[in-house]
Image (tube, helix red, strand yellow):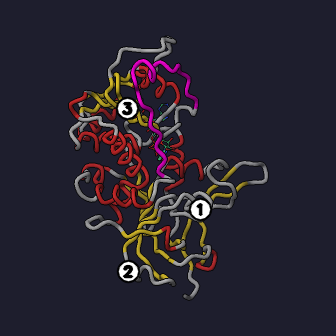
Amino acid sequence: MADFPFKALVVSENPDGSFSRRMVEKHAHDLPAGEVLVRVLYSSLNYKDALSASGNKGVTRRYPHTPGIDAAGVVVECVDGVYRPGDEVLIKHPEFGTNTPGGFSQYARVPSDWVMKLPAGMAPRNSMAYGTAGLTAALSLQRLQEHGISPQDGEILVTGATGGVGSIAVALLAKAGYMVVAATGKPQAGQWLAELGAQAIIHRDEINDRSGRPLLRARWAGVVDTVGGNFLATALRSTRPGGTVTCCGNVASPELALTVYPFILRGVSLIGIDIANCPTAVCRRLWARLASEWRVERIEASARECSLDDLSAEIDRILNGGQIGRVVVNTSL
Ligand SMILES: NC(=O)c1ccc[n+]([C@@H]2O[C@H](COP(=O)([O-])OP(=O)(O)OC[C@H]3O[C@@H](n4cnc5c(N)ncnc54)[C@H](OP(=O)(O)O)[C@@H]3O)[C@@H](O)[C@H]2O)c1
C-alpha cells in the first residue's frame, strides 16, 4: 500500500518531565506492523485515555504516543485475508491506545486478532457512544445478574453516575427493570439521569460515610461502583445481606478501607470488573447485547461529538471529573 498522510493526536514528554499534546501529520509508514489497516471513523474518550494523554506511565510506558483505547472504522487492507476491505470493525486489545498507537488518529494498523466485526445493526458512530465504557457497564450488569440480583431484590446504586461507565450503567440497569439510585456530584444533571431511567438521584456526599462504623443501614441490593475509595467502602457497608457490588474504577481513590464485616456478617460479594482482559468471546456477546436488547437510544443520542482538534479540552474536562455522559471522537471533523 502506498504511503499517505493522516492526522493524529500525539502526546510527548518534555525535557522538564511535563507532557504536551498536539495534532501532527503522520504517515502510513509510521504505523506499527500488523495485518489490518483500519480507517478510523470514530473513537471515544474514556478516563483511561485521559490518563494516557497526560503522561500516566502506569497506563502508557513510552512517549511520544497516540492514545485512544477505542476505535471503530472500515478495513482498508487486510494482508491475512481475515477481513475484507470495507468491513466495518472495532479494535479492542489491552495494548491498543495504551502501549501502541490508538484511536485518536485517522488510521490504525493492528494484528487481525485485535479486530472484530461491528455487531449487526450497530453503526460505527453509535458503537463509540458505548465504547469501552459501555462494555464495562454491560459486564457490570451481567455480573450482577450472574450473582442472582434481580429487579425484585431492591435498589441498585450507581456511583459516578454522570460519567461514561456510570451513565450507561444507569441506562442499562433501568432498561433491565432495576430500580436505580444514581449518585452524582453534579446535581444539575439530575434531569438527564432521570431520563436515562434513574428512579432517584442522590448527592455523592450521601454515600461518603466517615462515621467509622463497620456496617451501615443495609439499603442496596446491588451496586455498580465506578469511583472506588470511600464511596466503594461506604457502598459495601450499606449493601443488604446477599447483595453484590461491582468495582471497576478509581477516580476517587484506589484505596479501600473497611472491615471484613460486610462479607462475613452480610454475605456481601465484591466483584472486580476488568474489561481490558475480558475474553473476546464474552466481549462479543456483550457487544451483541448492546446492539439488540440492551440498546439505549438515549445514550447514543446524548453522546457529544468532538473533533481530533478539540479533543485536548475534552481530555482536561474528564481529568477534572467534569464530563457528563460520553464523548465520541469524529476523526473526519
Ligand atoms: N476496570 C475496567 O475494566 C474499567 C473500564 C472502564 C473504565 N474504568 C474506570 O472506571 C472509572 C470511570 O471511567 P469513565 O470513563 O466512566 O470516567 P468518567 O466519564 O470521567 O466518569 C467518572 C465519574 O466519576 C465521578 N467522579 C469524578 N471524580 C470524582 C471524585 N474525585 N470523587 C467521586 N466521584 C468522582 C464523576 O461523576 P459524578 O459527577 O456524576 O459523581 C465522573 O463523571 C475510571 O476509574 C476508569 O479508569 C475501568
Which badge, 3 or 2, is on the more N-terminal residue?
Answer: 2
Dot 2, crowdedness within 10 Å: few (<14), some or many (≥20)?
few
Magenta residue check for 77: no
* Numbered disc 1: secondary structure: loop
The front one of 285 and 323 is 285
Residue 214 appearing in the image: yes
Q: CA distance from mark 3 to mark 2?
A: 43 Å
Magenta stretch in the rendered image? 255-275
Residue 292 is situated, as x and y percent measured from the top left of the image, at 24, 58
Q: Which mark is residue 244?
A: 3
Tell me the quarter of the picture where residue 143 sits: top left
**Residue receiving disc 1:** 66
Tell me the quarter of the picture where residue 324 sits: top left
Q: Amino acid at mark 2?
A: Gly
**Residue receiving disc 2:** 86
Residue 300 is situated, as x and y percent measured from the top left of the image, at 30, 54
